[in-house]
Amino acid sequence: MKINTLEDLLTDELKDLYSAENQITKALPKMAKTTQSHELRSAFEEHLRQTENQIKRLERACNELGITPKGKKCVGMEGVIEEGKEIMMNGSEPNALEAGLIGAAQKVEHYEIAAYGTAAAHARQLGFNTVAQLLDQTLEEEKMTDEKLTKLAETQVNVQAAMER
């Protein structure tokens, strides 16, 4: 898609986010299955449910703009997820694996925070306030998930992994 206007860019960003979220729905169950930590598994499962709602929100945003969310592959998210797969495949000790999974999940969250923040700013600039509100809602969820993962890492997972030296 050729990008000539800010509206073209927003369309591209929404399609990219839609692809990213769909990739995440495939990765999260694998991450949840890999972990032995009940808290981490619950966090991944909760984020899966959240992600499914975020996809619906993106569909509403695209419907609001009269565009289809399909038709693009988010190569950025593909790369971040691939890094997470490497962590799962390398046979780490459980505590180190879980610390790695949290890091991989936070890379996903940080990518999403940047992408949703940018798209929301573009939607606001263009006067698409309903779209901006939908994107802002997801942005806040992504920030909360990142904070939850940080707390889990700092109070449990990283502590346990550090004791394995």
Image: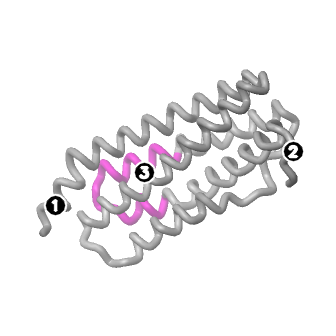
72 vs 153, left or right, is right
Q: What is the x, y in percent for residue 148?
A: 35, 40
Amino acid at circle 2: Asn
* Residue for point 87% across, 44% down: 4
Q: Secondary structure at mark 3?
A: helix
* Label 3 environment density (alpha carbons within 10 Å; few <14, some 14–19, many ≥20): many
Q: Is residue 97 above or below residue 121?
A: below
Is residue 148 covered in magenta? Answer: no
144 vs 35, left or right, is right
Q: Are marks 1 and 3 in contact (CB under 8 Å)?
A: no
Region rendered in magenta: 29-48
Residue 162's mark?
1
Q: Which residue is mark 3?
A: 106
Amino acid at circle 3: Gln
Q: Which residue is mark 2?
A: 4
Q: What is the x, y in percent for residue 97?
A: 31, 66
